[in-house]
Image (tube, helix red, strand yellow):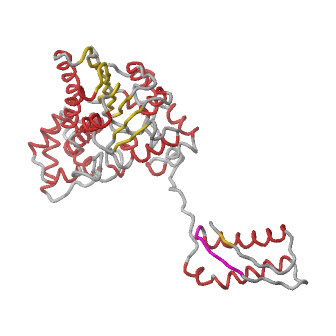
Amino acid sequence: MILWYNFHIKTKMNDSMISDSIWKMSDYLSRYYGKKAIIMEFKEISPKKEKSLEETAQNALKQIKERYKIMEQQQPEKKHKRRVRYKGTHPRRFEEKYKELNPEKYGDTIQKVISKGSTPAGMHISICVKEILEFFDIQPGQKGLDATLGYGGHTRKMLEKLQGKGHIYALDVDPIESVKTEKRLHDAGFGEDILTIKHINFANIDQVAEEVGPFDFILADLGVSSMQIDNPERGFSYKFEGPLDLRLNPEKGISAAERLEDITKAEFEGMLIENADEPYAKQIAKETVATMKRGKKIKTTTDLKDVIERALNFLPEKERKEAVKKSCQRTFQALRIDVNSEFEVLEELLEKLPDALAPGGKVAILTFHSGEDRLVKHAFKYGKKAGIYSDIAKDVIRPSKEECAQNGRAKSTKMRWAIKVK
């Protein structure tokens, strides 16, 4: 709060007296007017000599109250906004996990969650960090690209290896999380002199390379960040009630709910098979189309989960619960890949990678399902045969057992790498 006081006090008051009077007035104002800036000018407060300091202060406060009583009526007292309360001993919903959503303040809580093999709400634990850093062998002065910024865990570790010399460029299409990550990294000491973040799709890697030159190393982590999955408002998970969106950039394209509005049975069945290897694709596609023909729209994550449960109702009860869980995961994955055109943009990235790499440059890609891994595997093999890459990973690299135990979301990760000819 900014307060300007211009007091012309004709009586003799020492510094402590003046300070005490001003303190009383400022305390009153701060309680009644919050952070609103108030300009006050009292040209004369001239108490009689026999008046005490307390009387002087009270006289001043009385004048202030009279002068600003209209403002007091217009501005109701702000009520303190309480955090979301939850039943029981542990929060369940995303918005209830206030400690996990404030890692700077509740570091001990974050460590407890991680030690149990879980990912704190609003956070993302980077995968295969050790393996990536060992492969890149980053040297100070090099220039690198993180094609998928996300929470910034990989980016930060690579920045640390530069030791203040060199530069890393990072890309992300998510306008919500990328802003948070940028602030987080800048607060950690990584400013514009060593880090540049661009809000574009990695399919446009050629534009970045043309602007700043080829890179010594490039990383692409194709997984969806945990903070996207865990936030119900983003609609990435069947576990939470929320809008059926699934877009990495909610400002562009159509949502998954809109995609389903006019989809045919054959089209949805093909999508489920191609994007997720869904064994019950036929049944899920049939029930989805039938539901919409009955006039019921599928707008939320729960709506789609209910459709899948009805589609698999023919299974024995003891098998059904686990089958529904797996089919929900695969169906949401298939829709996410579709609405974000993930295979198409990955193919563009793989095609443009060689020209974006400097001679001897290295690329590492993390995939999370068979469709992605096949594309990366074939592109690297073709590049090796064509003389574009001097070496490629002979087998996939997987996270260690210890890492998978600490981070359950690492279990499906596959890492492949390639090195461009010098």
* Residue nearer the viewer, 75 or 183: 183
Magenta part mainly helix, strand or loop? loop
The answer to which quarter of the image holds residue 108 is top right
Task: Point out residue 117 in the picture as x, y percentages from the top left corner.
Answer: 46, 31
Q: Residue at x 53, y 56 (%)?
A: 83
Number of numbered discs present?
0
Q: Is 58 placed left or right of 308 in the picture?
A: right
* 14 part of magenta stretch: no
Q: Residue at x 46, y 31 (%)?
A: 159
Q: Is 106 placed left or right of 217 in the picture?
A: right
Q: Is residue 248 above or below residue 392?
A: below
Q: Is residue 284 above or below residue 132?
A: below
Task: Point out residue 135 in the picture as x, y percentages from the top left corner.
Answer: 38, 19
Span of residues in magenta: 35-42
The answer to which quarter of the image holds residue 223 is top left
Task: Point out residue 294 in the picture as x, y percentages from the top left corner.
Answer: 14, 57
Q: Is 3 placed left or right of 265 in the picture?
A: right
* 39 part of magenta stretch: yes
User: What is the quadrant of the C terminus in the image?
Assistant: top left
Q: Residue at x 30, y 27 (%)?
A: 365
Q: Residue at x 90, y 83 (%)?
A: 49
The answer to which quarter of the image holds residue 410 is top left
Q: Is residue 68 above or below residue 370?
A: below
User: What is the quadrant of the N terminus in the image?
Assistant: bottom right
* Residue nearer the viewer, 384 or 272: 384
